[in-house]
Image (cartoon, rainbow, N blue to C red):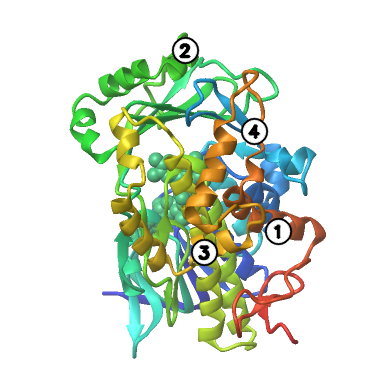
Amino acid sequence: TTRTDRSVDVVVVGGGPAGSTAATLVAMQGHRVLLLEKERFPRYQIGESLLPSTVHGICRLIGADEALERAAFTIKRGGTFRWGANPQPWTFSFGISPRFAGEAATAYQVERMKFDQILLDNARSRGVEVREECDVRDVVAEHGRVVGVRYADASGHEREVRAAYVVDASGHASRLRAHAGTRHYSKFFRNLALFGYFTGGKRLPPPNEGNILAAAFDSGWFWYIPLGPELTSVGAVLLPEALDRIQGDRERALLDLIEECPLIAEQLADAERVRTGPYGEIRIRKDYSYLQDRFWRPGLVLAGDAACFIDPVFSSGVHLATYSAMMAARSINTVLRGEADEAAAFEEFEARYRREYSRFHDFLVAFYDMHQDENSYFWSAKKLTSNTGTELESFVELVGGGGWQEDALLAPGVKGGGRDAAMRQLADIVDQPVRAAGEDRNLLQASLARSVVREGSRLQVQAVMGGNVDEVRPIREGGLIPSADGMHWVRPDS
Ligand code: FAD
């Protein structure tokens, strides 16, 4: 028999970064929030390299910044890439952004077991009721509206809880997402990843010792993320055709791939693979690039990986997860205050989430496209021919943001306009000859790169200034803007 617990204002499904962020921002407005998490924390998760707007923007808004500082995560100044036509690695720093310097221009590399625990504990301390080992099985729907969820509690009893809103933040394996629409898998980002952990790997020379190192090679590219003085996360991103190769002996496959990539082999020359505990396993992830065609329906809203994910290459996952969670919380808070109708509030969430997704999507496509190695199978498969261009265009159209057009129109200095010009501009900056090893590249000279940091910069300024600083115009006709405290939406003329 199913027990109906009671009702709350909001049920959040999943205690990753998206779930903790949404739950906290709703609870901070005095609403009753129940967060149900399937696992008992700490639990393993991939997605370790963060962006400044998450660390200094959203984590500050939810009040988790001091706890994160105490955790002493590796400080990430930027990224070092062996990518494009340059045989030499080059570096870009967040610090080149004109609005930020010093600490604001850094992010963290995190062990997600620790990071996600801090965010979940922070949610508890801000009034969220958190229940772990609760597996949400389905939504409860009435008259076309989601009114709660059904779940199995820690002792296996089936329960039902009712809520004005359900936030699905249960990640890539979400069971609830289909209630809001259909997931479309990307035709361009069809990569798979094979990853494990090492101790004793080398570090880049200061001040870049905390950077993510991304190294392209024939079969794809490697990430090399320094999680602490000893621990390094190492993963290969490959074409789906490589699945056969990595399915048998995963350790052999990972070590062979490392041998194929001299830069990573050199970093790991004296390292040992971790063989025990949560980091002892070599894992595979595939089919991780997708986009939901609807992000909400009455009573239900999707945030984070439940809604979409692009690709590991530029650390956009946790940013999009926390950003979408903040937008979802604003929409819920607005309706619970009785200040806008549901459709207006949630269409605002969806429009802004799609816009941010498109910015990153377009940038990542360009980032892959600027690798010039026509002889390698991975990179030629990633080259945008007119064929894949058509697929890509329909995908971008599906996204609805019209990202290419927007960037081309807004970007000063893009000769001729259009997406090809924007991509060429990015490739030109990256392919300038490297004069010194580790030289800094000003990626922000490229319009596509500027566009991906635009919203993140705004978030950081808002968090520091404690409110809505520069968003006084809606992003679309009839749209809403954030309230002065950033916690809900208001009409621009109010
Ligand atoms: P999750 O972190 O997946 O959290 C979802 C939570 O929901 C989990 O705790 C899960 O246990 C819980 N849950 C699931 N089902 C249920 C249920 N039925 N009931 C209750 N709870 C449930 N991102 C970055 O920012 N930087 C990176 O460097 C990066 N690298 C990546 C590399 C790879 C190979 C991949 C695949 C992804 C990477 N990402 C990266 C993306 C990142 O992992 C995700 O975007 C991020 O974890 C999404 O957060 P989330 O809160 O939406 O979901």
Which residue, given by chain and number where applicable, does mark 4 sit on? 441
State the separation of the CA atoms marked 1 and 4.
22 Å
Label 1 – label 2 distance at C-alpha? 39 Å
- Tell which circle, 1 or 4, labels the residue nearer the N-terminal end: 4
Image x and y of residue 185, in percent: 30, 57
Question: Which residue, as the protein is rendered here, is positioned at the far top?
Answer: 270
Alpha carbon separation for disc pair 1 and 3:
22 Å
Q: Amino acid at mark 3?
A: Gln
Residue carrying label 2 = 266
Q: Residue at x 42, y 15 (%)?
A: 262
Q: Is residue 303 above or below residue 160?
A: above
Nearer to us of marks 2 and 4 is 4
Q: Residue at x 33, y 74 (%)?
A: 179
What is the x, y in percent for residue 487? 68, 71
Q: Quadrant of residue 61?
A: bottom right
Q: Specify whether 123 is left or right of 237.
A: right
Mark in front: 1 vs 3: 3
| Mark 4 or 3, closer to the camera | 3
Q: Quadrant for residue 227, please give it.
A: top right
Q: Earlier in the sequence, mark 1 or mark 2?
A: 2
Q: Earlier in the sequence, mark 1 or mark 3?
A: 3
Q: Which residue is mark 3?
A: 405
Q: Residues within 10 Å of mark 4 (few under 14, many from 20)?
A: some
